[in-house]
Structure formats: C-alpha cells, structure tokens
Image (spheres, rainbow, N blue to C red):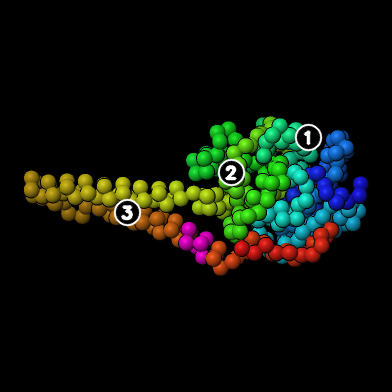
Amino acid sequence: MSQPANPYLSFVIPVYGSEKVLPELVARVDDVMETLPLARRNYEIIFVCDCSPDHSWQVIEQLSAKHPWVRGILLRMNAGQHNALMAGFAQARGQVVMTMDDDLQHSPSDIPALLEELGRGRDVVYARFKNRQHAAWKIWGSRLNDKVAGYLMKKPKGLYLSPFRAMKAAIVRDILRYNGPYVYVDGLVLSVTRNIGTVDVEHHDRFAGDSGYSLKKSISLWLKMATNFSIVPLRLTSFAGLAMAGVGFVLAVLLIIQKFTIDAMPIGWSSLIVTFLIIGGVQLVALGMLGEYLGRVLLTLNSRPQYVVGETVGLAAPESKDD
C-alpha cells in the first residue's frame, strides 16, 4: 500500500513505552483495513511518541521506512496523552480520525464497528468496553470520573468516555481551535457536539510492557476536566463557606442563650478547636481551588505550549503548537 494523498481514515495513537507492541499493532490494523470496502482502505497511522523512555521512536522510524502510510511525531518533552493527541490531530488528513491506545487493549478488529456507527450520521463514536483489563483502582477511578463528568460537563447518561473513539474531521478541526495548555479531549468533544454514539466492544490484556498511566497522571487528568470545563468546584467551595458560616451563626446564638440562662461557659471547650480546624480546612480548600484556576489562567496567558515537537518522520517539517 502506498502512502495516500487524501486518506479516508487517520489513526492518531499516542505512544509511551510500547516498542514491543508497535509492529504487531501496525500489522493488525493493516489486516483489518484490507477487509473494508475499497473506498475506505486508504489510511494513515500517526504515532505520537510522547518522549518515551524506551526505543519506541526508533521502532516508529523503522515502521515508517517500511510502510509509507506510517508517520511519526517525537515530542521533545512528555506532554501527556491528551496533549499528544492534539499534536497528531494537527497532522491528520483523513475524513475520519480514530484514536486508540498503543498497547492493543483496543482491538483493531473493532474498527469496522466504530466506522459503521459513525456512518449512521454520528459526529463521534466511542467504544464502550464490556469488561476492563485494568487494576481495580483504575476501574473505580474511571467510574468516579464518569459520574463527575456527567455532573460537571453534562455528559449524556450512559455515554462512556474511552480513548478508543472515531470522529469526523470537522469535529477534530473544532477541537484544534482550543489553544490552552491543559487539554482534555473528551471535554472538548462535549463542547462542540452532542451527536455521539457508542459501540460495545471487548477490552483486552496489554500485549506487552506496563502501562505508563499512573495515579498521579489520572489525578492530573481529573483536574483538567474539573477546572477547564466547569466552575462547579468554585461554586461548591462557595456553598461550603456559606454552610460553615451558617453553622457558626447558629453556634453563636446558642452560646448567647447559654450565657444568659446557665451563665457558665465551659472551660477548655475541645469542640472549639474542632470547629477551627473544619473552618480552616474549608478555607484552605477554597484557596487551593482558586489557586488552581488562577495558575491555569497564568500559564495560558504566558503562552505555555501544548506540546513541543522534536523530530518527525513522514511529515514535511517539525512543528510546535503554541497557545
């Protein structure tokens, strides 16, 4: 297969610690694409190497030399999965853009199902996993993230936000209008369309290696969702402050009544310390939340880049996306 000038489908795949997986991934994608109708067989794979510590970039270069439809972007610094996706989106040329993980937990055999659902008039289609081959903390964290996303971003009920998704090129162009450094692709999707479908698929064991998605990265992603697409956290801190003020007012009234009826104030009232700790904690949470928002605004105004490209293969020239 020669490199298509105008591919029908662009795969954008962030890569981290997957040097042993990539050749098998390319082979399986190629096998599946050969089964599609001729008009849909033209495709490209854009691997975005997120400053991987192994030899993933060298493998990408070898694959690109062997397969002209494989293209690669090497980020100079680790930017995170969603920022890496933006680097790939900027280079994608297909009428449809599909994202998937680099570890074969998302099976290429499910590609036709996503394309079929997209062809029914959907703007975006997500894969919804029947089972998940992840650690328990990741599964529970994902469920919590799903609940919070439904509240903060008004996510449609029953929609599972997974990294295995297919999107029309017009949606990707709308997503690329976002210039801030804190990227959350699913939040951007929900901000430009609600015409979203899902397809039930199986989730598979990782082909090789270990996952690079740590608890720290998961928390960072959650904060992006919570602070970039909603002011609900600020409102919650305001409500908490009002609640604490109300409790304080009630206690003040009770103390005044006690003063005039019993005329004996307890000495060393331990609950007073507890009250101070609760109020102080609420204040610190509120200040921290304000600091989180202000810090993101500062970095956005200072034009912090979403990603910095070091090298490319199969592309015209290295580019960097600045705010």
Q: Secondary structure at mark 2?
A: helix
Q: Label for residue 190?
A: 2
> x%, y% of residue 100?
72, 45
Give, as a three-letter code, the residue at label 2: Leu
In this view, 2 is above or below 122: below
Query: Circle 3 is placed at which residue position?
Result: 279
Q: Secondary structure at mark 1?
A: helix
**Left or right: residue 207 compared with residue 229:** right
Q: Secondary structure at mark 3?
A: helix
Give the mark nearer the N terminus: 2 vs 3. Answer: 2
Query: Circle 1 is placed at which residue position?
Result: 112
> x%, y% of residue 164?
70, 42
Give, as a three-letter code, the residue at label 3: Ile
Q: Nearer the viewer, mark 1 or mark 3?
A: 1
**Left or right: residue 250 compared with residue 20:** left
Give, as a three-letter code, the residue at label 1: Pro
Region in magenta = 293-298
